[in-house]
Image: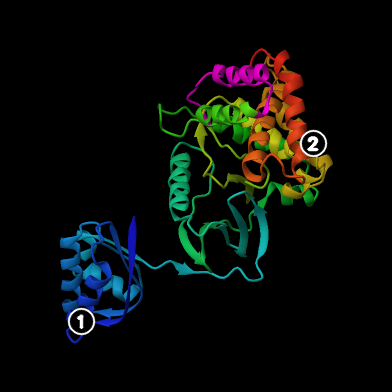
Amino acid sequence: MEKIIKLTGRIDSANAAETEQKILQEIGDFDGELMLDADALEYISSAGLRVILRLKKSNNTTKVINCNSEVYEIFDMTGFTEMMDISKAYRKLSIEGCEVIGEGANGIVYRTDPDTIVKVYKSPDSLAEIHNERELARKAFVMGIPTAIPYDVVKVGDLYGSVFELLDAKSFAQLINEGESVDALAKASVDILKTIHSTTLKPGELPSKKTEAIGWAEYCLPYLPEETGAKLVELFKAIPETDTMLHGDYHIKNIMQQNGENLLIDMDTLAMGHPIYEFAAIYAAYKGFSCVDKENCSRFLGISTENCVAFLDATFKYYFEGTDVSFDDVVKMSEIICYTRVLRRQIKRFGIDSAEHKPTIDFCKDYLIKTVPTTDKLYF
């Protein structure tokens, strides 16, 4: 639990005592995390600093946020930044008139100028998510994954965004629409995918995709015949827990090409587990989410339905080329995991009785009821 107190104007010897009394009255008996918002603070003198120091001594969780450059410099020069958590205000950025180059479940990606893109998160409470994605991107980069690392966090209206320097970069979706070969781009995509999947992790280094996926299956139990549901959960539990890195949201809007180099963005879904989860997510992006609305994936990815299917088929083909893994088997496994995820997603978001989403729910249920009994395993 936290309390935010606004600091405004100037705090100096003329008003420090009065300001301290007002803050103490506002705090009252509160003993949780105390945040002093300095967004409207123009100046603070040594008298004001002593007020902050006394607040810190009485409540060790006290932190100062949203300092402008001048106020932050005062805190820094006096050593306060070493004694307590003090942060600068986020730079404000406008996306008015900017080109939208991609959109996912969590955010929209805009090109703000020829050199820069910004991913604006849809939730106003996304700061923890943004910082987590930055750390995951750094981790992936150090491990040799070709990824763009966000270098700044900005305020966009009431929302937050991550800024990437991507000079004249284009997504694979844009390249396909400009006439680039679907087959060649799929092959390049597979090269990155194999790099990701060849990266081994320590136990617990990233979230377990198996744990998440079992949750999907268990959520669906009340909506499936008892035997089908029980076997579905067993199949999910039988998937081996591996130390393989997974991207988790791998599709053509999250792969950018810059001066011939292919780079990944959107690293907030990084996880670890068996690659079959990756292929289930890929299947969902290019085909699975269109199980009822046949143009859904096309609208999401921004390419034709024909190219969606062609890219999906080429991805599976090139990944398993030269192995003894059956293409048809992987497709079937991916479908089962995909439609379990979609069934859970539709019911959780819209409810079982939503007329608009009932056809998708019915499709997924019918597919699982028909397919699960004839399936022996969900991994290769």
Q: Residues within 10 Å of mark 2 (few under 14, many from 20)?
A: some
Q: Amino acid at mark 2?
A: Val
Disc 2: which residue: 309
Please indicate, yes or no, whether residue 184 appears anywhere in the rendered image. Answer: no
What x and y, as percent, mark residue 118? 56, 59
Identify which residue is drawn at 74% across, 20% down: 371
Please indicate, yes or no, whether residue 80 appears anywhere in the rendered image. Answer: yes
Q: Front-most of 32 and 164?
A: 32
In magenta segment, residue 228:
yes
Describe the element under mark 1 as helix, strand or loop.
Answer: helix
Determine which quarter of the picture holds residue 229: top right
What x and y, as percent, mark residue 108? 62, 56
Describe the element under mark 2 as helix, strand or loop.
Answer: helix
Disc 1: which residue: 18
Majority SS type along the magenta span? helix
Q: Is residue 358 left or right of residue 213?
A: right
Which region is colored magenta? 223-245
Q: Is residue 309 left or right of residue 259?
A: right
In magenta segment, residue 341:
no
